[in-house]
Each structure stands twice: as structure tokens, then as C-alpha cells.
Amino acid sequence: MSGQGETIAAIASPPGPGGIGVIRLSGAGVAALAERLLGRTPTPRHAHYCALTDATGGVLDRGLLLHFPAPHSFTGEDVLELQMHGSPVMLGCVLERCLELGARHARPGEFSERAFLNGRIDLAQAEAIADLIASGSEAAARAAVRSLEGDFSQQVHALTESVVRLRVWIEAAIDFPEEEVDFLAEPTVLEDLERLRHQLDEILTASRRGVRLLDGLHVVIIGRPNAGKSSLLNRLAASERAIVTEIPGTTRDVLRETIHLDGIALTLVDTAGLRETADPIEIEGMRRARAELERADLAVLVSDDAHAESDHGLLDVLPASAQRIVVHNKIDLDGHPPRRAMVDGDTHLWLSARTGEGLPMLIQALKDVADPGEAASGTFSARTRHVAALQRASDGLEAAWHALTERRAGELAAEELRGVQRELGSITGEFSNEDLLGRIFADFCIGK
Ligand SMILES: Nc1nc2c(ncn2[C@@H]2O[C@H](COP(=O)(O)OP(=O)(O)OP(=O)(O)O)[C@@H](O)[C@H]2O)c(=O)[nH]1
Ligand SMILES: [K+]
Ligand SMILES: [Mg+2]
């Protein structure tokens, strides 16, 4: 079979002893190698029970040998799977035997990379494999499976097709300058563009959700000194992680603690209290606090009820991209019961970090943000790389919109749409370079 790569081999099951161990091979020499191991030509996709022997014919182990001839295999090449006892020592010996017979060690992710290069899966699907393996919750795993099934890629493809249609149309108009101006004023062109922007935004939102499922939620706790930020972090982490004292300005550096709610990881970030000060250490601490806010999915503004009024001004510090919860802490001091209310579109919670009263409400609110529940049923897994590309595509559509509406510049709009097409193509790997591929597949485990 032509077009197959060097024969690669790897132990595909996890390291350590196990019930079953699997060695996987792919490439040009697989068919010959399978024949040597089995002593005859294996039947395609048939489980042969056989002895796996060393060079002298000594039995290393007995197990199943499965041959998947190209192109109907995971990589699109000839693939061989050896299933045997999960003994790390014997797996090593059988792998060694495969190397003697002409295979070489596979690099991390090399099987998936070949599957991608042979068009069995696109890049987003290949990434979904790694994400499925690494997923830490059922929600994340299900989302990864959906991406692996191609849900995400299909949506990106559909979008790309619409972009191409619009671009071709605009380019055709440019070729007839006397009609161009009229054409660009056509409401249908702008309607199409508007619809595209809407669809792209929906995918962008879903992708952000997908990233959150994989990477967890970045929750930044901010507020004035002594509001009880560190006390709250300790409560949520159920440990004395952060130093708590009655001295304002206790926390000066950024402090992180990961907790899990229903299988979803939340990185809680405690920060230095925000106030006017001349202390250079505190000033640096506040700079870091603001930097953390920039990449927050959720900002928890902690306010000591006594200063609620002035703390309200801090809401302006929060980036628009982050969701937010306002916590009114220390209700134990005035004896008010815990409660939850919506104020100007924000969730406000009254609780006590000291006594733990009202804390379940906060945990519920965090869960609501972390796991969008019903809304997540259509969520696919996505990576920061995808979100960044979609964001650039979205900016490109906006630029195309301005080019058409304000400047009647068809050429410019077409150029922007070409850029959008490239960005979308980079997600599924139609436009990719070796650097990017190298970086993506190096993160995979060996044997995948
Ligand atoms: N009564 C009461 N005291 C609290 C509560 N939460 C925190 N405190 C007290 O408030 C003081 C400050 O708490 P911290 O958790 O250090 O506050 P912080 O916001 O991290 O302060 P900085 O790190 O200095 O910005 C400490 O003396 C805490 O014991 C609460 O719910 N009730
Ligand atoms: K303090
Ligand atoms: Mg603190």
C-alpha cells in the first residue's frame, strides 16, 4: 500500500500493571510484521488468538492480534493491535520485538497526527481525542465526544461555506465596477453578513463554554482590604490556605486554589485588597489583582456590609467579559439572615465567611456559572486556540460590515472575508503549519 509512513509502535494502554495491555502499530510495514508475528496472513479485522514470540520462538505472552488494513483504520494506514496481559514488563518485551521487526517508537500523538494527515479526522476532532482522554468530568467528556463526532467542525464548516458564498458574490460585483456600488447597497448582502455574525457569535459563546468545561472556571475574588476575601477562599477550599488577619493589606500576592464542584474544576484566585496606598508591595499586588481580573470567567466582589455603598464603585473595575457575583460578607455581625437577590442584573449574596452561613448559596451560584446544565446539552469541547480564531473571525466580519456600510469598499470587504475564511480553516486544520501541528500533537500521550 503506497502513501504509508514509517511503521510506528507504542504501548497504547496506560503505564503500570493492568488487566489488559495494548500495543498499537501503524504504517507501511505493519502487514509484513503481522505476518511474522502470527505465522500467516491475518484476516482483516478478525481477532486472532495467538502466541507472541521472541526471535528464538520463545513465548512472551498470548493474546489477540487484530489487523486493520488501510484505509479502514484509525490512522488510515495499516494498523495492528496486540492485546495481551497488562504486564508492563511483557508489554515492553513485545514492543521490543516489534522494533526488531522494523517498527520504531511512536512520538506522542503520532497516531492521531497520521489520522489527521490522512484525512480521517480534522484538527478539531484530533484535539477532541486528547480532550476526551484528559476530561475530568462527565460534562467535559460528553462535550469532547460531541467534538470528536464532528459537531463543532460541522458548524465551523457551515459557517465557512456561507463566508465563501458571500465573498464570491462580492468579488463578482467588484469585477463589474459600474454595478458595484448598487450591488453593495443591496440589503440582502448586508442581511447575509448580519446572519453570519449572529451564527459566529453563537459558536463563539458555545466554544467559550466548551473551554470552560475543559480548563475549569477562573474565579477571581476581589474587594477592599479586610472585606474577607481570604476568609472566603479558605471557606470554599475548606482549608486554611490563605493568611487571614484583622490587618488590612494582609494578602499581597495572588493566591490560587483549585476546587471541584460536580466534577468541574474551579480555580479560585485570592487577591490583594484594592485601596489607595503608597506601599509599593501593595501597589504591585493590586496590579496583579487587576491582571487576574482580565482573564476571569467570574469575578466575586466581596464587600463588607458596612462599606456596601462605597464598594459598589468597584463594580466598574470588573471587565465586561466576566460574569460577576457580589458577596455581602460578615452578616454575623448584624445578625441578618443569609439571602440572595438580583440587583441591577447582578446576583447579590449576603453571607458570613466566618460562620459559613449562606455559603451553600454561593456554592450553588458558582455551580450555576460553572455548569450551564440544560444549555450545555449542545456544548462541544473547544480550546483557547479555537476561541481566539473565532474571535478574530468575528472581528473580521465586523470589519467587513464597516467596509460595506460606511465605505462601500467591496475590495476591502472581500479581503476581510478571506481573512475570516482563513481563521475558520485554521480551526479544522485546512490552513495549518507544521509549527502548530507540532505543538498540538506534542501534548498528546504516547500511543494516541
Ligand atoms: N465577623 C466576621 N469577620 C470576618 C468575616 N470574614 C472575615 N472576617 C474577618 O475580617 C478580617 C479580614 O479578613 P480577611 O479574610 O483577611 O480579609 P481580606 O479581604 O482577605 O483582607 P486583605 O487580604 O487584607 O485584603 C479578619 O479579622 C477576619 O477574621 C465574617 O464573615 N464575619
Ligand atoms: K486582612
Ligand atoms: Mg486577604
Image (cartoon, rainbow, N blue to C red):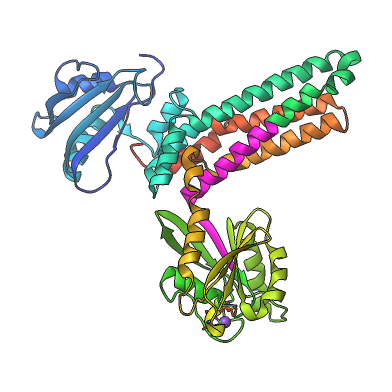
Q: Which residue lies at the image location 43% right of the left edge and 42% below the top edge?
A: 131
Query: Residue 243: percent from the left, percent from the top?
Result: 50, 80
Q: Which residue lies at the image location 62% right of the left edge and 42% below the top edge?
A: 388
Compared to residue 361, the image places residue 279 above or below, namely below
Quadrant housing residue 148: top left
Query: Residue 175: percent from the left, percent from the top?
Result: 83, 14
Span colored in magenta? 196-221
Q: Which residue lies at the image location 61% right of the left edge and 31% below the top edge?
A: 424
* Quadrant housing the N terminus: top left
Q: Is residue 261 magenta?
A: no
Query: Residue 359: percent from the left, percent from the top?
Result: 47, 70
| Residue with the most extreme bottom position | 246
Residue 334 appears left or right of 7: right
Residue 240 appears left or right of 179: left
Most common secondary structure along the magenta stretch: helix
Label tally: 0
Quadrant housing residue 63: top left
Seen from the viewer's position, the closer of residues 396 and 238 is: 238
Ligand 3 quarter of the rendering: bottom right
Q: Which residue lies at the image location 69% right of the left edge and 34% below the top edge?
A: 197
Residue 193 appears left or right of 73: right
Asked if residue 444 shows in the view, the reply is: no
Query: Residue 60: percent from the left, percent from the top?
Result: 12, 35
Asked if residue 341 shows in the view, the reply is: yes
| Residue with the most extreme left position | 58
Compared to residue 365, the image places residue 127 above or below, namely above
Compared to residue 171, the image places residue 92 above or below, namely below
Quadrant housing residue 112: top left
Residue 263 appears left or right of 399: left
Q: Is residue 200 magenta?
A: yes
* Quadrant housing the C terminus: top left
